[in-house]
Image (tube, grey):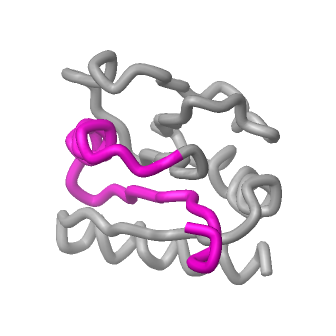
């Protein structure tokens, strides 16, 4: 699964850069599983911003972490990860999306649809 996710994310970021657009990716499931799947790929990326009100079970090394949405204003990144396991807050999500440069990815980690 992890190799398939890595391949998909690499393809999406390549297409996004070609067309200078942003892509939205949902990873739905148990939080620890989602971080386990995503962390190896995140660790290969240069500009990652993680927005979460919880500590990540697996912290992508050297990546920026934001707890307050107002603190992202004026920042830019290539990949933004929004942890929605505590809830999906529109203002915070909008601030998160605003940080992603053209050619980047917005990744939302969320519970399964049955739990959400």
Would residue 113 be found to the left or right of residue 39 on screen? left
Image position, residue 86 (x, y; %): 57, 44
Would residue 101 be found to the left or right of residue 12 on screen? left
Q: Is residue 67 above or below residue 56?
A: above
Toward the top, the furthest residue is 71
Residue drawn at the location 22% of the way across and 23% of the way down: 73
Residue drawn at the location 24% of the way across and 39% of the way down: 91
Residue drawn at the location 36% of the way across and 38% of the way down: 77
Q: Is residue 15 above or below residue 86?
A: below
Image position, residue 112 (x, y; %): 63, 73
Residue drawn at the location 26% of the way across and 63% of the way down: 22
Image position, residue 81 (x, y; %): 49, 47
Residue 17 lies in quadrant:
bottom left
Question: Which residue is nearer to you in this view: 105 or 14?
Answer: 105
Residue 116 lies in quadrant:
bottom right
Does the magenta segment cover residue 106? Answer: yes
**Residue span colored magenta:** 87-116
Image position, residue 16 (x, y; %): 30, 69
């Amino acid at each position: 699964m992890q190799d398939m996710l890595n391949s998909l994310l690499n393809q999406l970021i390549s297409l996004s850069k070609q067309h200078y657009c942003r892509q939205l990716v949902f990873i739905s499931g148990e939080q620890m599983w989602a971080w386990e799947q995503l962390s190896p790929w995140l660790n290969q990326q240069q500009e990652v911003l993680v927005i979460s009100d919880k500590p990540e079970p697996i912290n992508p090394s050297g990546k920026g972490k934001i707890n307050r949405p107002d603190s992202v204003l004026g920042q830019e990144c290539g990949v933004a990860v929004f942890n929605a396991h505590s809830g999906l807050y529109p203002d915070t999500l909008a601030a998160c999306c605003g940080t992603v440069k053209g050619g980047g990815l917005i990744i939302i980690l969320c519970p399964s649809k049955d739990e959400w």
